[in-house]
Image (cartoon, helix red, strand yellow):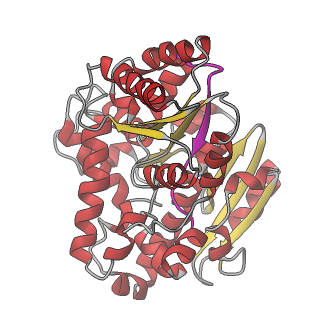
Amino acid sequence: MINRMYKRSQYATLFSRLNEKRRFIQVVMGPRQVGKSTMVKQVIQDIDKPYARFTADNVPATNTGWISDCWESARAQMKIKGLAEMILVIDEIQKIYGWSEVVKKEWDNDTFNDINIKVVLLGSSRVLLDKGLSDSLAGRFERIVMSHWNFSEFREAFGWDINKFVFYGAYPGAAGLTDNPDRWVEYITSSIIDATVNKDILVNSPIHKPALLRQTFELASSYSGQELSLTKMLGQLTDAGNTTTLSGYLNTLSEAGLVTGLYKYAVDEARKRNSAPKFQVYNNALKAVYTSKTFENAYSDRKLWGRIYESAIGAHIMSYSYEGEYKVCYWRDGDDEVDYVLERKGKIIAIEVKSNAEKSNAGLSVFRERFHPYMSFVVGDGGVGTDDFLSCNPAELFK
């Protein structure tokens, strides 16, 4: 279970902002099961201010009046109790159609009438949140982005070692289930995969072949850290249609924060898109759940562990990519390769993953000579320590 005593760094940010004068709506966003609700609960319990908390989990998507009802309830409590301020928390706000227009109206009404309600919105669908924020709430909000947990957080909260983190990934709710592999798989499948696909994707996206979407996710996750052309992928899927359909589903799965297809780094954008994708999960638990071996057996299989290890490094990089506003690719030219290439504002960073001394990293030298990256280094054997890299925010490397 989530260690509810552990406070992630976003706790201090939200706590500080809610102690300020009412200024912006606070939008807490991130994938499912990273601790958004727990963090907000910790803040409102510690801050010693009156609050009202609501969740849209079981509210019909068309019931836009529900948001106004939440607001009116908070206003009524302020009047009845003679309160000078109130914190209003609404969870899974993106599930209500047209939510941003209603939030704008209620927020602006409070501003005009000098009603001191400080608002915290939470959501797990990045795409729907971004659309609503950009459409209606420009200038009225601040984001607090919560990525997947890093290794130092897991070590402090749960006492994990690096190999356990590499294999099982970074979902805190599953941390106490690893002694029972079947139970762990059931949690990841139902609470993460099924919930994201059924509640975030199928409800809000025009998916004509849901079974194919699920097969695409499962195959891409099992191949995380490896290249596989969409044409070859078609041969392993039933009722697959064409590569355009697969590419569209991969984009949808990426927007939902599950798995993505990385394209080959090239100066020419068209060359990137024409390359075979390298699949990459956003949390390595999503690869482990489709690994047929146990943690102990996988660790003793050098080749398999190398793939799991590379996927874990990539998952960490992808987890911070939205918050850090950088793009991620891979690079290959013949036998020369670089596992991950990060790009932001004209700067590029090349990262080679080396799980053991047998793997060569000659491609890094070739890449340096050809593209002159801002930074290039090895993670793993003979380079930056795995525990150090999986504890950092890769976006900080650009500074």
The residue positioned 75% from the left and 59% from the top of the image is 366
Q: Position of residue 246 (x, y in %)?
A: 33, 37
The question of residue 308 being in magenta is answered with no
The residue positioned 37% from the left and 23% from the top of the image is 67
Q: Position of residue 307 (x, y in %)?
A: 46, 70
Q: Nearer the viewer, residue 365 or 125?
A: 125
Q: Position of residue 352 (x, y in %)?
A: 65, 65
Q: Which residues are magenta?
A: 136-150
Q: Is 247 on the left-hand or right-hand side of 30? A: left
Q: Position of residue 342 (x, y in %)?
A: 67, 49
Q: Nearer the viewer, residue 195 or 77?
A: 77
The residue positioned 72% from the left and 76% from the top of the image is 383
The residue positioned 60% from the left and 63% from the top of the image is 335
Say above or below: 116 vs 2.
above
Q: Is 21 on the left-hand or right-hand side of 306? A: right
Q: Main secondary structure of the magenta part?
A: loop
Q: Quadrant of residue 177?
A: bottom left
The question of residue 146 being in magenta is answered with yes
In this rendering, the count of numbered labels is: 0
Residue 276 can be seen, yes or no: no
